Image (spheres, grey):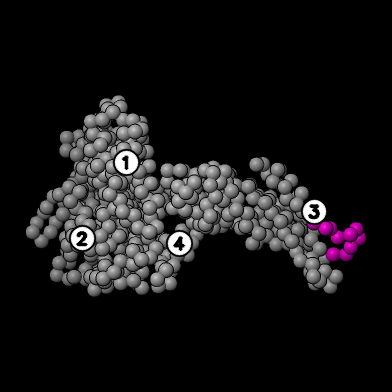
């Protein structure tokens, strides 16, 4: 794959095949003409839990397998819920966790052949002058996509690490550093270069006092839709006393967005309505909504409050 | 709202409409006597919704819909048609919209990924439909139609139900989360 710039790895294919069918291409986005099936790599779909070591996921573990794994359901409910919130049962059976993390954005300008936008190597973001009801409210620069993954915020909330294989060998980094914004490179959403692969996902064993919550707001019912906003929350608490908070939102920014300001506001405090409002407000303080998506600011704040309450219940 | 109440509402409306005199021979759609007479069809829909003020999400939890269909030639077909109208009407009220990029005029959601239709879980938990059969003097064999009318009650009823729930009329369709939250914010 390193030798051929038009080669792409394929596993579940639930995003990649749609991408190819939609013929998304431009000077910065080649038309993939060689697909390398990576499903045959032994052990790449493992789900292994060890009390001392934590949870290790192969990138090809399906979303369905993760959702229904007893250890994940028991110790990492936020991840089980997030995996189960993505797409439809059919897609979750073939779609992998690695694919869910690395899937391309759903922006309707990006996925339309009529618009040659920044992400395809063009020099314009059509969402700025056009319909942006579902675009970014935070950290948008040049490009205003939102990160579409449901699993990624849950992994970040659980402080997971990504191990990737590059030309220089293996490298491990927290998911906070794995995703990159459009300012760093508008053509991709994560650190992977052509030919690199995500090879392992690992996260520590959560504290026994950790409460977790995953809430997804979507445009219709509970089925088969990308999030308008979703929130993954892990709160370590002793009754009403918050020891540590980890809150990550997706659907609001070009990368999954860690609400650092909210985490700082909650850490070491006793929970109250006023504190939650203040924390949620702090998290969205730097939101810069576009012409049609200011409503997402309100949804994000409300979901942060709701998810902390749910995690501590 | 029970189905009996809904039937009563439609029957009251239907009873106000002039009936053919006793002994009138009816049964042909092309009878010259009825030139200039248009066919009127009636229906009533009653919808209950839940609105989540935190996300603007609207869920329809109950639908009751009754139509005056003239003579029902295929009663099961009529019932199915009304069920379809309920679902279609909910989509029209809440999600379905063809979206154009204003500067270029290009449709940005020409696919079922972005043009949202509800899945089966968007159907209310309780759906009751019925019809009444006043003989129609214009239609063939006393029948009217129920294709389009079945779609109509859902949108206005859902608009009114949202008003009842959160105290504000959402003045656009579809009533997406953005529209509902904007309307609540302007309250």
Please tell me whether residue B22 belongs to the stretch shown in magenta: yes
As drawn, the label of residue A280 is 1
Residue at image point 32% right, 41% down: A280
Chain letter behind tag 3 = B
As drawn, the label of residue B115 is 4
Mark pair 3, 1: CA separation:
57 Å
Q: Are circles 4 and 1 on residues that touch, CB within 8 Å?
A: no
Of residues A146 and A294, the one nearer the viewer is A294
Q: Nearer the viewer, mark 4 or mark 1?
A: 1
**Label 2, on which residue?**
A183
Residue at image point 29% right, 69% down: A124
Please tell me whether residue B52 belongs to the stretch shown in magenta: no
**Label 3, on which residue?**
B16
| Mark 4 surroundings: few (<14), some (14-19) or many (≥20) residues within 10 A | some
Mark pair 4, 2: CA separation:
30 Å
Chain letter behind tag 1 = A
Check if mark 2 and mark 3 are on a common chain. Answer: no
Q: Nearer the viewer, mark 3 or mark 1?
A: 1
Quadrant of the rendered image containing residue B43: bottom right
Q: Which portion, as a residue range, is magenta?
A: B17-26
In the rendered image, the residue lying farthest to the front is B186
Image side of residue B95 versus residue B12, left or right: left
């Amino acid at each position: 794959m390193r030798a051929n710039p038009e080669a792409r790895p394929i596993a579940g294919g639930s995003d990649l095949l749609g991408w190819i069918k939609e013929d998304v291409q431009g000077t910065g986005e080649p038309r993939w003409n060689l697909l390398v099936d990576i499903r045959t790599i032994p052990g790449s779909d493992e789900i292994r839990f060890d009390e001392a070591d934590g949870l290790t996921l192969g990138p090809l573990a399906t979303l369905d397998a993760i959702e229904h794994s007893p250890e994940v359901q028991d110790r990492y409910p936020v991840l089980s819920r997030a995996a189960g919130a993505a797409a439809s049962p059919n897609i979750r059976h073939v779609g992998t966790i690695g694919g869910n993390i690395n899937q391309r954005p759903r922006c309707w300008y990006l996925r339309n052949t009529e618009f040659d936008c920044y992400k395809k190597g063009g020099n314009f973001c059509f969402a700025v002058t056009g319909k942006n009801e579902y675009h970014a409210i935070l950290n948008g620069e040049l490009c205003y996509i939102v990160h579409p993954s449901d699993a990624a915020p849950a992994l970040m909330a659980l402080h997971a690490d990504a191990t990737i294989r590059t030309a220089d060998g293996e490298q491990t980094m927290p998911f906070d550093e794995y995703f990159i914004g459009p300012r760093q490179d508008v053509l991709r959403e994560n650190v992977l270069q052509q030919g690199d692969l995500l090879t392992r996902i690992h996260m520590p064993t959560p504290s026994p006092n950790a409460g977790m919550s995953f809430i997804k707001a979507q445009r219709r019912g509970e089925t088969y839709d990308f999030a308008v906003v979703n929130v993954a929350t892990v709160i370590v608490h002793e009754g009403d006393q918050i020891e540590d908070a980890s809150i990550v939102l997706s659907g609001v920014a070009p990368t999954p967005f860690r609400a650092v300001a909210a985490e700082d506001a909650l850490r070491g405090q006793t929970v109250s309505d006023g504190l939650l409002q203040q924390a949620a407000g702090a998290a969205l303080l730097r939101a810069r909504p576009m012409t049609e998506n200011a409503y997402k600011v309100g949804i994000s704040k409300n979901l942060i409050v709701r998810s902390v309450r749910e995690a501590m219940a | 709202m029970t189905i009996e109440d809904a039937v009563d509402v439609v029957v009251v409306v239907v009873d106000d409409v002039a009936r053919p005199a006793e002994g009138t021979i009816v049964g042909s759609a092309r009878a010259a006597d009825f030139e200039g007479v248009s066919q009127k069809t009636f229906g009533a829909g009653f919808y209950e919704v839940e609105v989540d003020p935190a996300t603007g999400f609207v869920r329809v939890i109950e639908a009751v819909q009754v139509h005056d269909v003239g003579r029902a030639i295929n009663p099961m077909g009529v019932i199915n048609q009304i069920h379809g109208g309920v679902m279609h009407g909910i989509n029209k009220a809440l999600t379905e919209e063809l979206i154009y990029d204003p500067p270029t005029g290009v449709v940005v959601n020409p696919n079922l990924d972005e043009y949202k239709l509800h899945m089966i879980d968007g159907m209310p938990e309780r759906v009751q439909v019925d019809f009444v059969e006043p003989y129609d003097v214009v239609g063939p064999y006393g029948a009217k139609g129920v294709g389009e009318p079945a779609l109509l009650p859902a949108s206005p009823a859902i608009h009114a139900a949202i008003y009842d729930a959160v105290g504000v009329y959402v003045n656009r369709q579809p009533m997406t989360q953005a529209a509902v939250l904007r309307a609540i914010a302007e309250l």
